[in-house]
Image (cartoon, rainbow, N blue to C red):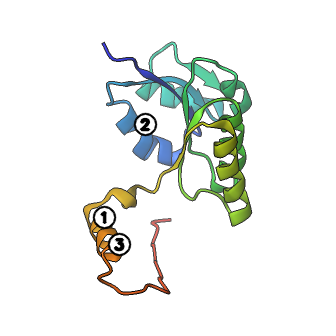
Amino acid sequence: MNKKVKVGIIGCGGIANGKHLPNLSKLPDVELVAFCDLIESKAVAARDKFGKPDAMIFTDYKELLKVPEIEVVHVLTPNKEHADISIDALYAGKDVMCEKPMAINSEEAKKMVEAEKRTGKKLTIGYQNRQRADSLYVKQEAENGTFGDIYFAKATAIRRS
């Protein structure tokens, strides 16, 4: 029998309920053991829909980080909170999956990477497009030199909201 990874969710809003939780709840190797949101009813609703009845509920992420059996946290909060929560989680001994954007500026992003290096824990950012077939193809072509020396690139993204 495979060991299940015990996951804590920090932020139970739109991205959690629309993307992360529906998919995490289908994975046989994942156990959603804790849900945290500043609005307790959101954490309870997420647990009731995607977790087990005995999953823990928190309104303070720092309390969730104290739970020793939680191995991984998903940081699904408003963007301005990503860096602080991710850094605290890494120093609490948790691996972190942080929703994009990584941080609100490069200084915060550097602090996140430094925390990952110092703690030896894993930090990943939800840049899922990196794994799309078209993205992988363009990356391979760039590495093969198809485009020559790249000195400038521009990317545009459009969000629904």
Amino acid identity at mark 3? Glu
Q: Report the residue marked by disc 3.
A: 143
Q: Where's residue 136, x and y in %?
A: 30, 64
Amino acid identity at mark 2? Leu
Question: Tag 3, which secondary structure?
Answer: helix
- How far apart marks 2 and 1 lie (CA) works out to 26 Å
Mark toward the start of the polypeptide (1 vs 3):
1
Query: Which callout, 2 or 1, points to the residue nearer the camera?
Result: 1
Mark toward the start of the polypeptide (2 vs 3):
2
Question: Tag 1, which secondary structure?
Answer: helix
Q: Where's residue 101, x and y in %?
A: 57, 59
Q: Report the residue marked by disc 1.
A: 136
Q: Quadrant of residue 129?
A: bottom left
Check contact, mark 1 vs mark 3: CB within 8 A: no
Callout 1: few (<14), some (14-19), or many (20+) C-alpha neighbours within 10 Å?
Answer: few
Q: Is residue 38 visible from the viewing direction of this image? A: no
Callout 2: few (<14), some (14-19), or many (20+) C-alpha neighbours within 10 Å?
Answer: many
Query: Which callout, 2 or 3, points to the residue nearer the camera?
Result: 3
Q: Where's residue 159, x and y in %?
A: 46, 67
Q: Is residue 86 left or right of residue 101?
A: right
Q: Is residue 1 left or right of residue 123?
A: left
Q: Report the residue marked by disc 2.
A: 21
Amino acid identity at mark 1? Leu
Residue at x 66% of width, y 26% of height: 64
Residue at x 70% of width, y 22% of height: 66
Total numbered labels = 3
